[in-house]
């Protein structure tokens, strides 16, 4: 199925409505730079997972960050979630025609 401009506009409107249900204004931190505030929606994908190494245990809490197609976000960006917890962007979906979807996790 090929999406035309009307389809993309409908998808963008649906995602904007989803973001508006529980918006979070974030100022992504990229290295030493703090970007201008942007509005996103952060959604927990599933419960926490614990990965055990030789001497440590690290909690992983997979999150999805949704924003408009124009969202200025990069892998490695950090921000604070609804509870003030530090989160790091781990991946960004490559199709950003209608909206931006990024994967994130608790920063270690």
Image (spheres, rainbow, N blue to C red):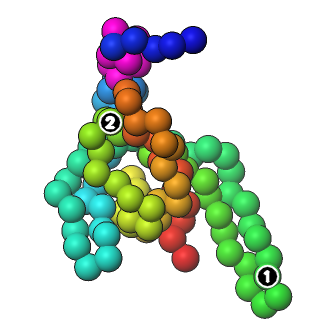
Marks 2 and 1: CB-CB under 8 Å? Answer: no
| Sooner in the amino-acid sequence: mark 2 or mark 1 | 1
Which element type, helix, strand or loop, lies under badge 2?
loop
* Residue at 31%, 35% in the rendered image: 68
* Residue at 73%, 60% in the rendered image: 49
Taking the image as shown, residue 57 lies to the left or right of residue 71, namely right
Which element type, helix, strand or loop, lies under badge 1?
loop
Task: Report the residue that reaches farthest toward the right.
Answer: 54
Please state, as top left, top right, bottom left or bottom right, where the N terminus lies in the image: top right
On the image, numbered disc 2 is attached to which residue? Answer: 69
Q: Nearer the viewer, residue 92 or 50?
A: 92
Residue 14 x, y percent position in the rendering: 39, 19
Asked whether residue 14 is in view, the answer is no
On the image, numbered disc 1 is attached to which residue? Answer: 53
Please state, as top left, top right, bottom left or bottom right, where the C terminus lies in the image: bottom right
Dominant SS in magenta: helix
User: With respect to residue 53, does 81 lie above or below?
Assistant: above
Q: Quadrant of residue 20?
A: top left
Separation of marks 2 and 1 at Cα, in angstroms:
37 Å
Q: Quadrant of residue 85?
A: bottom left
Task: Report the residue that reaches farthest toward the left.
Answer: 36
């Amino acid at each position: 199925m090929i999406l035309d401009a009307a389809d993309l506009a409908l998808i963008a409107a649906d995602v904007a409505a989803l973001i508006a249900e529980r918006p979070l204004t974030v100022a992504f931190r990229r290295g030493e730079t703090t970007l201008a505030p942007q509005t996103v929606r952060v959604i927990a994908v599933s419960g926490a997972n614990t990965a055990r190494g030789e001497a440590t245990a690290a909690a992983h809490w997979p999150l999805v960050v949704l924003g408009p197609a124009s969202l200025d976000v990069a892998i490695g960006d950090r921000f604070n979630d609804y509870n003030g917890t530090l989160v790091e962007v781990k991946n960004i979906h490559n199709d950003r025609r209608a909206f931006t979807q990024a994967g994130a996790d608790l920063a270690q």
